[in-house]
Image: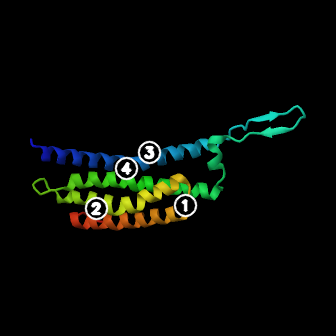
Amino acid sequence: MDFETLLGLAGAALFSLAMVVLVLWPILVAIIESFKVIRGSVRQSTPFLITDTGATIWQKDSRNSTTESISVGDKRLRLSVLLACGVEAAFIVFLTVVLFQHADPRGDGMEMMGVGFAFMLIFLPFTLPAFILARSGQWLMLAAGLAALAAVAYFAFWLEVLSELGLPNA
């Protein structure tokens, strides 16, 4: 095996690893954030100090100070966008499995180009930025718009995949 072939295989392996990590990351974060919300319904006690004069000083938890500053509506929007991004990332995994199952065994494998198309033209420009914005809690309306646009694009792409593979729509 010559050096160029080895370099090409290493590049393909690194690209595949990056794609898997980028796709699985939003799914895992959406699950973790959902559990945080479920656990967050039980309110933890707030630590306080009573001074010599009898005054009470309430201490704010430093690790939750950023999430406490956003409103309940923003928390719900943030969680909704994170869950939408997680579902959209799971769709790429689902699409990969469906295309593997319906690929022509004697064909050239061009059916798998659908996964690359969905990853490069929908996931990277729409889902990943929406996920990053929602994860940081900033620009939530833009993140929601990007996630919604990606959902519409995934749906249209799914209908196109169904028609190309000759599968029934419903």
From the viewer's perspective, is 39 left or right of 133? right
Give the alpha-carbon distance from disc 2 to disc 1, as whole Å.
26 Å
**Location of mark 2 (residue):** 117
Extreme residue toward the front, this view: 3
Q: In this rendering, does residue 135 appear at all?
A: yes
What is the number of the mark on residue 140? 1
Please name the residue shown 37% across and 50% down the image.
22
- Callout 4, which amino acid? Leu
Quadrant where the C terminus is found in the figure: bottom left
CB within 8 Å, label 3 to label 2? no
**Location of mark 4 (residue):** 22
Q: Which quarter of the picture shows residue 55?
A: top right
Q: Secondary structure at mark 1?
A: helix
How dense is the environment of label 4, judged by Cα within 10 Å: few (below 14), some, or many (20 and up)?
some
Give the alpha-carbon distance from disc 1 to disc 3, as whole Å.
20 Å
CB within 8 Å, label 2 to label 1? no
CB within 8 Å, label 1 to label 4? no
What is the number of the mark on residue 28? 3
Quadrant where the N terminus is found in the figure: top left
Residue 41: percent from left, percent from top: 64, 44
Extreme residue toward the right, this view: 53
- Callout 2, which amino acid? Phe
Of the residues under marks 3 and 2, which one precedes in the sequence?
A: 3
- Image height of 124 relative to 57, above or below: below
Give the alpha-carbon distance from disc 4 to disc 2, as whole Å.
15 Å
Q: Secondary structure at mark 4?
A: helix
